[in-house]
Amino acid sequence: MNGRISRVIVVAGILFVALCLPLGLDPQGYAIRVLTLIFLFAAMAQSWNIVGGLANQMSLGHAAFFGIGAYTSTVLLIRMGLSPWLGMCAAALLGGMAAALLSLPTMRLSGHYFALATLAFGEVMRVIANTWASVTGGPGGISVPFGQDSWWMLNFKSTRPHYYLTLGALVIIPLEEAANFAFSAHAAGLSALVYGLLLVTIIFVEPRGLVALAGLQKRWRRGS
């Protein structure tokens, strides 16, 4: 019990430091930009963990879904003036559709074959992004024009708001995973509330227990 309490204190301390850290950094400096990218890629790693960690499948094409979402939101912003908050919804929908279509053939594979299939998908999307210059801007990408500071348009002269956005994504994604697992538990006839609280505790207090929980899920599936 004392060990768990100490872990909770450590996690809370880390979050407190992460929230206060940008206040002492140059809002347009190099350090805060690096930290923002660290949080961004850490959030991506959390999403990859669903396939690579829990499903035990080596996915090498996750960057493609990141690109689909980024291009969708940016193209809607540039061409239609749509807020990135709404563009995120469209990006999630399009990325989810691409993942669903890809899963139809690839989820029948495993091991090296699954890894090669996802790698091929990532390469196909990279070639499309480089050659479809009328939409993606080609190898140079798309330049987003600067404007007045606006949370609705996610346009800031300072990097500090982007720091907090990526930090929020890093915290929200594990909680979203917990909600999805709780829904799955309810569908399996288990207590969603107890299962969700257990998963949140495991994620933030005892991450090693996630392995045991994944093994327990496999037993439930076999039993059913």
Image (cartoon, grey):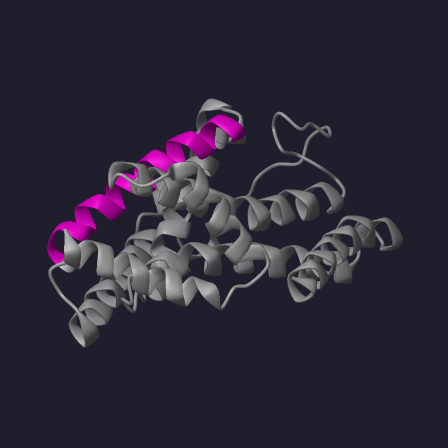
Left or right, residue 219 beside residue 60:
left
Residue at the spot 20% in from the left edge and 76% down from the top edge: 112
Q: Position of residue 102 (x, y in %)?
A: 19, 51
Q: Nearer the viewer, residue 107 or 55?
A: 55
Q: Nearer the viewer, residue 208 or 25?
A: 208
Left or right, residue 114 beside residue 15:
left
Q: Main secondary structure of the magenta part?
A: helix
Image position of 29 with respect to 85: above or below? below
Q: Say if the magenta span includes residue 88.
A: yes
Highlighted range, magenta: 85-105
Residue at the spot 18% in from the left edge and 46% down from the top edge: 101
**Residue 157 picture quarter:** top right
Looking at the rendered structure, the number of numbered marks drawn on it comes to: 0
Residue at the spot 42% in from the left edge and 57% down from the top edge: 139
Residue at the spot 35% in from the left edge and 50% down from the top edge: 65
Q: Residue furthest bottom?
A: 112
Q: Position of residue 29 (x, y in %)?
A: 80, 57
